[in-house]
Amino acid sequence: MVNESIKKEEMMFEKNSTKDKLNNLLSVKWILVILPALFIIVFTFVPMISLFKLSIIDENGFTFKYIAQIFTEPIYLQVIWLTLKTSFIVTVISIVLAYPVAYFIIKTKSSRTKKVILMIIMIPFWISLLVRTFSWIIILQEQGILNTFLKNIGLINQPLDLLYNTASVTIGMTHVLFPYMVLNVYSVMSSIDTQLVEVAQVMGARPIKAFWQVFFPLSVPGILSGSILVFVLALGYFITPALLGGSKNMLVSTLIQNNISATLNWPLASALSLVLFIITMVLLSILAVLVKRNPMLKEGE
């Protein structure tokens, strides 16, 4: 009897200790969830709300005059349109350039070569954005590397106007955002079972047909995730458009900075930020709806 009671006590003790361990793990888990959430709320959403309040509240109370000013004056609509157009072009060019590179990496058999290529792609992350942007100024200016080379080989007599325009902004932003697209597409491609393509070829499909009907649909999620990331980053990019675009090719980000530092019009700058945020959310929502209805993406998943 004494032994049985001792065993029962030991079992109860083990159960209690197990419950205590579970409770401790749950408490640690909640702490790990709550702390980052609080950090995001305090240092992201609270400043955003305070900033957006400037655009709809002034000394006289609620007002929508700053937002109305954006949608009634052509200059602001032109800047918003240029921002959307440039972001879209940068995204499309990034897809066209990144997909073959990611596919080449996947097809490379040597793991060492893969690592070297990925390392080269990631090198820009370790270089200052200012340095990378100024390098394009050196390349694209009238007496720059590109114009000098074209003159020396006889293709041009006068230097081309390659700097401080939409083209230079597009080139610079594509260069900066290209690695994000490559890494997103590569991460999805690396998870695709290549034997599916081989099976399709064994069953009679030509290599090109097998690629488009089997491999490509499975890689669409990588294209989509990379496109979202690049497009959203391009919408709010500042340093590259400010240095390569000049005063005649302002994007929304540079216009916001101009209203803050030059004209000291904080409410209008806040209204521009709010409009840009709303546009981004609307576009992402539309994209999310299209994704759900896209059979190619569902097949890829």
Image: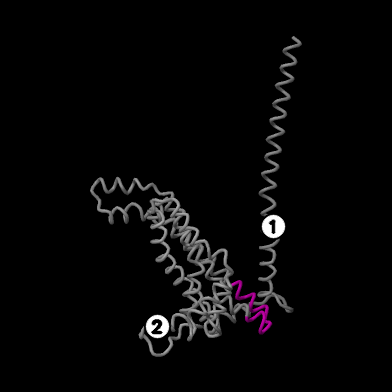
Where residue 37 sits: x, y (%)?
67, 54
Q: Judge from the rendering whether residue 295 lies leftward or rightward of residue 41; answer left or right.
A: left
Going 57% across and 64% down the picture, which residue do you hit? Answer: 126
Q: Quadrant of the N terminus?
A: top right
Q: Identify the amino acid type marked 1.
A: Phe
Q: Say if the magenta span includes residue 84.
A: no
Q: Residue furthest right?
A: 2
Q: Identify the amino acid type marked 2.
A: Leu
Give the Cα distance between marks 2 and 1.
52 Å
Where residue 61 sits: x, y (%)?
72, 76
Does residue 149 sit above or below 286 in this rendering?
below
Classify mark 2: helix, strand or loop: helix
Q: Judge from the rendering whether residue 6 lies leftward or rightward of residue 165; answer left or right.
A: right
Which stretch did the figure color magenta?
Answer: 258-274
Q: Judge from the rendering whether residue 137 lies leftward or rightward of residue 22; answer left or right.
A: left
Q: Considering only order in the chain, which callout, 1 or 2, is on the residue closer to the N terminus?
A: 1
Does residue 193 sit above or below 232 in this rendering?
above
Residue 243 vs residue 76, the one in the foreground: 243
Check residue 39 in the rendering and tell me which mark sits there, or answer none.
Answer: 1
Check residue 150 in the rendering and tell me which mark sits there, or answer none.
Answer: 2
Residue 288 in view here = no
Say which quarter of the image contains residue 207: bottom left
Going 72% across and 23% down the picture, which residue do you hit? Answer: 12
Q: Residue furthest left?
A: 204
Classify mark 1: helix, strand or loop: helix
Does residue 233 sit above or below 291 in this rendering?
below
Where residue 48 sits: x, y (%)?
66, 67
Mark 1: give few (<14), some (14-19) or many (20+) Cα within 10 Å: few
Q: Say if the magenta span includes residue 263.
A: yes
Going 30% across and 47% down the picture, which residue do you hit? Answer: 198
Going 49% across and 83% down the picture, which residue do you hit? Answer: 141
